[in-house]
Image (cartoon, rainbow, N blue to C red):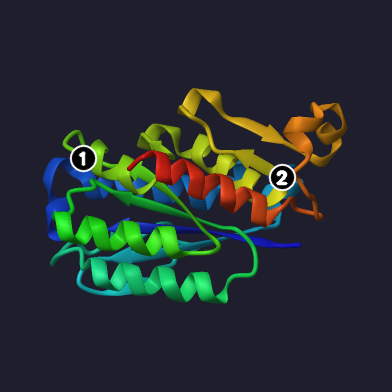
Amino acid sequence: MDFSIVTVFDSSGSFIEMAKSRVNRNIWRTLVQLKQLRSQDEVISRAKFEYYSWNNQFQQVYADSASGVPVLKVEGNADVTLLVEFIRQKDSASKQPLPVLLCTDGTFKHDDLLLLRKSLLEASHIIPMAIAVGIDADLDNLNTLTPFVYAPENILEAVDYAVSFTCGIAKCPAALDEIKIITPDELSSLPAEDNQDLEFSDYGSQGNLLDRYQMRMMKLE
């Protein structure tokens, strides 16, 4: 079964500063080249990568096979209501866990932060992940939205973890260095108290995965 990984690039006017737009472009280029870099990876070959530009508009963007990754037009403000509506639409259309990588500096107004957090907690399928762009990235804000926050140079690690949500069960870690992936083959070796609530389909248990994510998010309050 194929699966999707969505990447949203903040292309608001603040990304003119400190080469943030260049960082986003490098992230995009890395993701576009990922299938070539891992051409023998059967899982990655099934992944469908979608890319979106977000400011006061929300639009899908594409890389050109001839000229490569285009420069994202940086302007306007990051309209959180557009992002919230996008999340709702994607969540409604999805039937399996859908990782969404948000590449942003996280400098949201308080009310916008609460609105975005609420939409993520209400989503049934969205697994939000953040790539902290810029030395002034607001890590407190990003950690309020998701426990999965990565530096741009760790984008491939983020993708690996995103893939794990669709190909097994990723236990939400108390810290990022405590990541543990559980596959169906490992289930029998777990103590009874650890595996009694785990169920597996071909790509893991969506329900338990999302329950664990929601519990982790509540602990951040």
**Is 80 above or below relative to 201?**
below
- In the displayed orientation, state which residue is furthest to the top: 177
Label 1 sits on what residue type? Asp
**Is 178 above or below relative to 102?**
above
Label 2 sits on what residue type? Gly
Q: CA distance from mark 1 to mark 2?
A: 31 Å
Binning the other alpha carbons within 10 Å of mark 1 as few (below 14), some (14 to 19) or many (20 upward) gives some
Q: Which quadrant of the figure contains the C terminus?
A: top left
Q: Position of residue 45 (x, y in %)?
A: 70, 53
Residue under label 2 = 168
Residue at x-position 20% and y-position 61%: 112
Q: Position of residue 48 (x, y in %)?
A: 60, 61
Q: Is residue 16 left or right of residue 158?
A: left
Binning the other alpha carbons within 10 Å of mark 2 as few (below 14), some (14 to 19) or many (20 upward) gives many
Residue at x-position 28% and y-position 65%: 54
Q: Earlier in the sequence, mark 1 or mark 2?
A: 1
Residue at x-position 41% and y-position 51%: 28
Residue under label 1 = 138
Q: Position of residue 80 (x, y in %)?
A: 24, 66
